[in-house]
Image (cartoon, grey):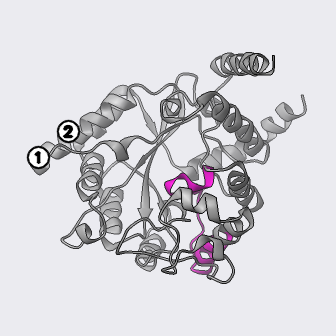
Amino acid sequence: MIPRLLSSLLLISACFAQTSPTYAERLGWKKGDRVLILHMDDAGMSYDSNAGIERVLEDGVARSLSVMMPCPWVPEMVHYLKAHPDTDAGLHLTLTSEWKEYRWGPLAGVSIVPGLVDNEGALWSSVAAVVSRATPDEVEREIRAQLERAERMGFHPTHIDSHMGTLFATPEFLERYVRLGMDHQIPVMLPGGHDTYIQADMKSPEAAVAQMQALGERLWRAGLPVLDDLHNTSYGWKPPKGLTEPELQRWRTGMYEKTLLQLKPGITMVIMHCTSPTEVFPHISDSGDLRKADMLAMVDPEFRKFLDREGFIVTTWRELMERRKAARPRSLTENSR
């Protein structure tokens, strides 16, 4: 009886989500608008990561990024952000250190968060290791330490999100993540709308979507904007071997075009990893080609034409928060019903 009741409630929730306004509409966009945050992860991870992101910011269409505060090249990226203060830059809250030879440790200190640290003194290399060894309190101490370092450097993030999705791995971690955003009035990357696209990547999507929708409404009531959906598949697009740079660019652009056409109306964050790999990057990771492909797609004039032709609206977390502040009087009326 209980599983049948749960299924019925989820079905009702899904039907309601299809007829209720999207978060894009609640933020002032028109019904049917497809609004994108083209978002570059892993700023500060390496020189090559910063170079690729900065090239796209100056020559391409992606306008949002997030910084991995425990990583070695954070100072260079923060100096760039200070020179370009209107950049949409958030925190890529980092609880893992996944590469074999290139690693980083927690900012809170090993003695403060011992459950987050492996025998090399670095953060664990996998999400599963963090889940099995770290407590929610340790997770909260570390993500707050990362925000504190950013603020100490004069970097005031426009949003927060989660490296490798670690903060989405357990309900307890997710609660600390959401609470950090609400406590500091910083927008939280969380797909709390219809979640049509991301469900294809989810395990037990019905339960996960119901949880995200409930958290989305909680963030909205706290005065923060919420995503309708998440496009997080590009890291799995392994480039064919032997492509020239123009061929690599055209192939990757085609992948983005094909998948973006599948998106439903609302605000969708599109995650990518734009990098300009030097001869050093292969010593960090074997993902250089796919990261370079992301960078090339975002500076491709044909991709810009595609976005214009299909009527996509490119926005930022900064704009979302400005619109959420403007929508607050109306939201108070909605919440009193």
Q: Which residues are magenta?
A: 144-168
Q: Are marks 1 and 2 in contact (CB under 8 Å)?
A: yes
Q: Quadrant of residue 137?
A: bottom right
* Residue matched to label 2: 251
Q: Amino acid at mark 1?
A: Leu
Image quarter (top left, top right, bottom left or bottom right) of the N terminus: top right
* Residue matched to label 1: 243
Task: Give percent across and percent down for residue 151.
Answer: 63, 75
Residue most extreme to the right: 336
How many residues crowd mark 2 within 10 Å: few (<14), some (14–19), many (20+)?
A: some
Residue at mark 1 to residue at mark 2: CA–CA distance:
9 Å
Q: Quadrant of residue 51?
A: bottom left
Q: Amino acid at mark 2?
A: Trp
Is 284 on the left or on the right of 197, as rendered? left
Task: Give percent across and percent down for residue 313.
Answer: 45, 36
Is 163 on the left or on the right of 193, as rendered? left
Q: Front-most of 1 and 108?
A: 1
Residue at position x 32%, y 59% in the image? 58
Q: Front-most of 276 and 163?
A: 163
Of labels 1 and 2, earlier in sequence is 1
| Vertical position of residue 304 compared to residue 99: above or below | above
Was residue 234 drawn as part of the magenta stretch in this picture?
no
Task: Give percent across and percent down for residue 76.
Answer: 40, 77
Image quarter (top left, top right, bottom left or bottom right) of the C terminus: top right
Is any atom of residue 87 visible in this view?
no
| Vertical position of residue 298 compared to residue 53: above or below | above
Task: Give percent across and percent down for residue 266.
Answer: 55, 30
